[in-house]
Amino acid sequence: SVDSQGLYNQKDNVEILTATNFKQSVTNSNRAWLVEFYNSWCGFCQRFAPSWKDFASDVKGWSDLVAVAALDCASEANHGLCRDYEIMSYPNLRYFREGFQEEPNNYGFAMHRGVTAEDHRHDLVKVIVNEQTLGRGAHFPNMLPFTSNSLDGIFEGAAPAVQYAILTVHEPTSLIGPELVLDLHSSPNITSRYAFTNNTKLASSLPSGPLPNLFIINRSLHPVLLVPKSYDRQGMLDAIEQNLKGKDIVFPKNPHKTNDEAEDEEKQPPSYLVQNMQDSVFQMDLETALRYSLKREVGSSKEISGEKLTALRNYLEVLADYFPLGLNGKKLLKQIHSMAQISQVVQGNEIGKLIKEAEAESRQVFSTPQKWLGCQGSSPEFRGYPCGLWKMFHYLTVNVAEVNAKNRSTNPRLALQAMHGYVKHFFGCADCSEHFQEMAIRRKIEAVASLEDAVLWLWQAHNEVNKRLSGDLTEDPKFPKMEFPDKRNCQRCRNPDESWDSGEVLKYLKRMYSSVNIHYMGAD
Ligand code: FAD
């Protein structure tokens, strides 16, 4: 078993899956599995995780029927599995029914992704009800509505030990009835059903109160209407438990929040040195971002063709011409670019393989270990790849501008287009990608008319993202997001009235991201 990985640990009720335990857990299981495939560096996944943990705690009492799990696709070891299951954006929720068998084109059922723990619970309940409507999910208790027009049959199929039936009557839009069925399923003495108010014959034969109506029915079919303190799940469970007190009934344990919200592991502080060099660009971050991008993101795409292939070619072209690598590295990027140019369909993993082979070879292609330096967060879920990617694209816009300063025929949007296409088709953080595309339209990326405007366009776009994320849960407390560049680093970048002096900002960016100012700390 795995104690901790990525955004989850043993203290959560989320079961941690890895490439090693996935198959033996999920396939041929006697329970269903609801798996979040995520990416620990993806800000949306980080914001999503608390709701997934709350959800897992909330439905802990159902865990003999359905497991709530998570698998970190950012972990190198899990990457192949995520590729096989065609996980292209994160977080990605899949439902694997009980007895799931691996077979081609069966990658689980892609679930709707809600926001709150309650959304996740509702989505799960809907899927289970739907499964039973289709004749599956036999290991769940009966989750279908009770459609009989009298109480006859409410104990149908119940074991002899079952002494009481719970019946909830509510609007068809509510899910409270099916939820109580799941909450009560582990009691050997209670069976639980629900009916809709449009079952008018049944409803009119029962006493009524404010909806939802909650009844306890004994074997003589005598209904007692309960009046809970609150008409939510917990209030209704409390009312049932209260009513059955002293009746020698095994009542399910309160599934709610037994976990203490223990602190996450100790955070490891980054070195002062790097912290004080925030506006420096490190070769190590650029190379690590490049390798991650080609091995993991491009490498995860199965067949790349059409518009996506065009995006890949544009990206590779800019990399081959402007990414700072030595001779062998440049040769490799050119080779990959030509391969993409001449093929109608490119397999992403071929590109990933070329990078991995180059890493294994003794000839020097890359100059740094695959680690973060300036982009190292104060704990593993912070910074890393998205930080490296921003830096790489700033570097590219600046260097395309620098190299072609006198070349008027260069496409002013060369680097921006490469980035736009990459983010659209390959960047695993799907929501970042959507925001970026929306921003590209709103900020008129197509109207950028000079290489220098491209540098400034990306600076402004990045600042907009910084502003939006300032104070967000994904913000590394050691590296607060702010409008860039900070006043302390560039006083001249701001006019006396605090507005930007874009000429000075441009100078600052050109200096910071210039190839001559790259720091080779930690490089060979
Ligand atoms: P980052 O914002 O990643 O910045 C990295 C470094 O770039 C900084 O340390 C600084 O040296 C430099 N820098 C900062 N601002 C500027 C600037 N304006 N101009 C030039 N250099 C600058 N996360 C979300 O949660 N939601 C999103 O919608 C989202 N969209 C994204 C879109 C893209 C294209 C990318 C690459 C990432 C996106 N992210 C998004 C991730 C987010 O922007 C950060 O990258 C992530 O939170 C890590 O932040 P960080 O503190 O390391 O700094």
Image (tube, rainbow, N blue to C red):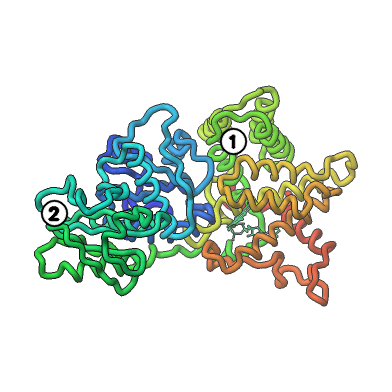
Residue occupying the point 32% across, 37% down: 135
Q: Give me the disc on residue 364.
A: 1
Tag 1: Cα neighbours inside 10 Å, few (<14), some, or many (≥20)? Answer: some
Front disc: 1 or 2: 2
Name the kind of residue labelled 2 in the image.
Val
Tag 2: Cα neighbours inside 10 Å, few (<14), some, or many (≥20)? Answer: some
Nearest the camera: 134 or 336? 134
**Residue 125 as seen in the image, left or right of residue 507:** left
Residue 372 lies, in percent from the top left, at 55, 52
Residue 408 lies, in percent from the top left, at 90, 42
* Residue furthest bottom in the image: 496
Residue 327 visible in this rendered orientation of the protein: no
Ligand 1: does it lie within 8 Å of the C-beta at label 1?
Answer: no
Name the kind of residue labelled 1 in the image.
Gln
Q: Is residue 50 above or below residue 440?
A: below
Residue 156 lies, in percent from the top left, at 18, 47
**Residue 473 as seen in the image, left or right of residue 338:** left
Q: Earlier in the sequence, mark 1 or mark 2?
A: 2
In what quadrant of the picture does the C terminus appear? top right
Q: Give me the disc on residue 194.
A: none
Q: From the image, tell me which residue sits under label 2.
A: 162
Q: Is residue 29 above or below residue 229?
A: above
**Marks 1 and 2: CB-CB under 8 Å?**
no
Label 1 to label 2: alpha-carbon separation: 72 Å
Nearest the camera: 250 or 335? 250
Residue 269 lies, in percent from the top left, at 48, 65
